Image (cartoon, rainbow, N blue to C red):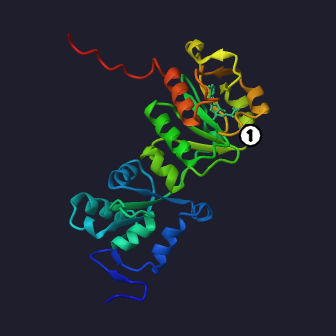
Amino acid sequence: MTSAGGERRGVGRVREVTSLANPLVKDIRALALKKHRDREHAFMAEGLKLVIDALDGGWTIRTLVYGKAGRGNAAVERAAARTVAAGATVLEVSQKVLAAITRRDNPQVVVGVFEQRYRPLEAIRPAGDALWVALDRVRDPGNLGTIIRTVDAGGASGVILVGECTDPYSLETVRASMGSIFAVPLARAGADAFLAWRAGAGVRLLGTHLAGAVDYRDLGASDGPLVLVMGNEQQGLPEPLAAACDRLVRIPQAGRADSLNLAVATGVMLYELRRDALPRTPEPAP
Ligand code: SAM
């Protein structure tokens, strides 16, 4: 029997939903708005592989949604069983509902709703050659997702969001992170709290600035934990943050561009700083 919300109890604890008016579907669609994500401490991630990686990584799932095309798929059914075992909800939905949830005409078959995670800044005590990336008021979701992905690929420790930043758990940022949202620790703090933390944590701040005095190729090996500080897309680093940095580094430019894109500049810096830590591709045999 189908209820007014277009819901039908399926096999086990899987619920079949076909109506956009269903309250569970409405709640998931509301996660498109930051105020709902903040209130629910939840976010959405698309794709079976991402969902499996997140479950493997111990992320708390609230709801697993899959389209009818996922029915009978062994991997989808295993993910559904793990979701039920975790006490969460599984929805089998129509294509129309899946497209509305993901806001895509061609949605992925599986979507997971997970609890957000932030690491408290005071719990972060970088040691050894740890490299964190601090982003000052990053505004663009694509930049943030790309940076999270690059931090993951470069083997850096995590990202500290300083000041009013775009939401790392928006659909756009999660998409741009390509799954790295589940691998990279995130912290957030106001600028004052960030600088107070730095004073106690014994880390050096390496700022990037268009007027930096040091060429990024002349940095040399780091002798302790480091935080790479990147400025806002429009305004760059504000004066107090720039003044607090131990060194200000510049990436040289030829041509007419006045600066590099924030995510590109972060990638250039990360790969320079992690050059010796990353495994080398073996040379091909002669
Ligand atoms: N108009 C801004 C300014 O005056 O700084 C441009 C900001 S840029 C798009 C965003 C951030 O990327 C900068 O704050 C800096 O952290 C980094 N960045 C971009 N190009 C850079 C370069 N050539 N050298 C050092 N940092 C750079």
Q: How many marks?
A: 1
Closer to us: 191 or 103: 103
Please say if 81 is above or below 259: below
- Helix, strand or loop for disc 1: helix
Residue 236, image quadrant: top right
Identify the image quadrant of the C terminus: top left
**Does the closest atom of ligand 1 sit within 8 Å of the Cβ of label 1?**
no
On the image, the x and y values in percent for residue 92 come to 33, 72
Residue at the farthest front position:
256
Left or right position of 54 against 29? left
Residue at the farthest top position:
286
Residue 45, image quadrant: bottom left
The residue located at (53%, 42%) in the rendering is 185
On the image, the x and y values in percent for residue 140 come to 59, 46
Left or right position of 156 against 76? right
Identify the image quadrant of the N terminus: bottom left
Q: Amino acid at mark 1?
A: Ala
The residue located at (67%, 43%) in the rendering is 137
Q: Quadrant of ligand 1?
A: top right
In the rendered image, is residue 89 in sight? no
Please say if 263 is above or below 111: above
In the rendered image, is residue 286 in sight? yes
On the image, the x and y values in percent for residue 193 come to 74, 40
Closer to us: 147 or 48: 147
The residue located at (34%, 52%) in the rendering is 52
On the image, the x and y values in percent for residue 117 come to 54, 51
Q: Residues within 10 Å of mark 1 (few under 14, many from 20)?
A: some
Please say if 83 is above or below 119: below
The residue singled out by tag 1 in the image is 191
Left or right position of 112 against 164? left
